[in-house]
């Protein structure tokens, strides 16, 4: 199941999990597709599968089978992730093929969404607007791409303080509810849970800043408590993580989140009004152009 990126994205870059079992019919099945997510650019990663005799493949931006695992019996399993990180500018289609029907197959993936800067557009081959071309010349972006070593985006960037919420619940309840301190952001950074024996036993839901069900995760597809599934869901107001238990049982859930200052580039990126002092700094450091170029 694909994440509805355009609905849930609020403070990019952000990273979301999809963790929902899928019913497979014999033959090839489309299990998730990302299309129509413009103006964003996506990175698909965090792929994790329960072990079964199933073939997985992913097509992206017109290329077939850019990711292919011919037999998920040899996958790393749900407590780990496969070494896949794929940028997508237009469309990505994930498929699974099996010889016979499979019910409630457990798997998950992560999608990180970026608002494209001039630098990011050049990296993934998207055309630049006229003013972006001017920025590319002004900052020598072509030379930078030709000579710099790419550094993956750190999903935990900007976190200065860490917190962990760990609970044991026998029914529905609150895992954590956090109010963002003034001038700071709260970043939901990871989730893990004891895995129930059957699907649809319990779900982990996340709401933040007027967006409900940013995440709706079946615990059956999450990693166990020995591994954290990484995320980046930002809140400037209120972050709520709830357990929705559908069957009785003991549910152990752990989430981590971080707190950090909201920087001037983040305010520019998110359209937050700057104070007079912040605007003075932004103009002095040329931050408006640097943010659009992808250098701040």
Image (cartoon, rainbow, N blue to C red):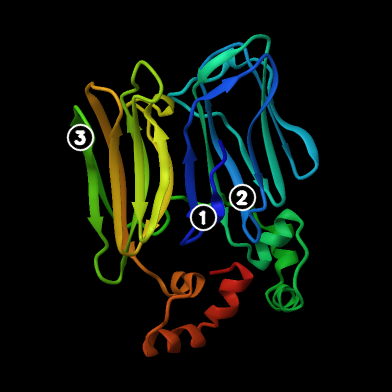
Q: Which residue is mark 1?
A: 7
Left or right of 266 on screen, residue 86: right
Q: Which residue is mark 3?
A: 167
Residue at image location 60% in from the left, 19% down from the top: 24
Q: Which residue is mark 2?
A: 42
SS state under label 1? helix
Residue closer to the observer: 103 or 114: 103
Left or right of 177 on screen, residue 106: right
Residue at image location 21% in from the left, 30% down from the top: 171
SS state under label 3? strand
| C-alpha gap between disc 3 and disc 1 | 29 Å
| The quarter of the displayed image where residue 242 is located | top left
Residue at image location 60% in from the left, 67% down from the top: 294
| The quarter of the displayed image where residue 58 is located | top right
Q: Earlier in the sequence, mark 1 or mark 2?
A: 1
| C-alpha gap between disc 3 and disc 2 | 32 Å
Quarter of the N terminus within the rendering: top right
| C-alpha gap between disc 1 and disc 2 | 14 Å
Q: Earlier in the sequence, mark 3 or mark 1?
A: 1
């Amino acid at each position: 199941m694909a994440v509805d990126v355009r609905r849930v994205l609020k403070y990019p870059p952000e990273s979301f999990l999809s963790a929902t079992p899928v019913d497979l019919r014999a033959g090839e099945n489309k299990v998730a597709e990302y299309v129509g997510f413009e103006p964003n650019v996506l990175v698909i990663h965090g792929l994790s599968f329960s072990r079964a005799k199933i073939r997985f493949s992913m097509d992206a931006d017109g290329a077939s089978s850019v990711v292919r695992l011919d037999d998920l019996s040899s996958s790393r399993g749900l407590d780990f992730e496969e070494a896949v990180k794929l940028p997508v500018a237009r469309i990505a289609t994930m498929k699974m093929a099996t010889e016979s029907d499979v019910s409630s197959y457990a798997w998950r993936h992560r999608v990180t969404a970026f608002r494209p800067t001039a630098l990011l557009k050049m990296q993934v081959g998207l055309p630049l607007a006229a003013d972006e071309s001017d920025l590319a010349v002004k900052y020598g972006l072509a030379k930078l791409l030709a000579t710099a070593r790419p550094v993956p985006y750190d999903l935990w960037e900007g976190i200065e303080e860490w917190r962990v919420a760990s609970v044991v619940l026998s029914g529905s309840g609150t895992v954590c509810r956090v109010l963002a301190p003034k001038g700071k952001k709260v970043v939901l950074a990871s989730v893990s849970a004891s895995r129930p024996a059957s699907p649809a036993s319990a779900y982990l839901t996340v709401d933040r800043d007027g967006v409900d069900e940013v995440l709706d995760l079946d615990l059956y597809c999450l990693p166990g408590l020995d591994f954290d599934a990484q995320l980046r869901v930002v809140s400037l107001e209120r972050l709520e993580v709830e357990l929705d238990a559908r069957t009785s049982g003991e549910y152990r859930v752990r989430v981590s989140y971080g707190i950090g200052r909201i920087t001037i580039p983040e305010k520019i990126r998110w359209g937050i009004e700057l104070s007079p002092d912040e605007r003075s700094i932004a103009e002095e450091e040329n931050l408006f152009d640097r943010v659009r170029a992808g250098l701040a």
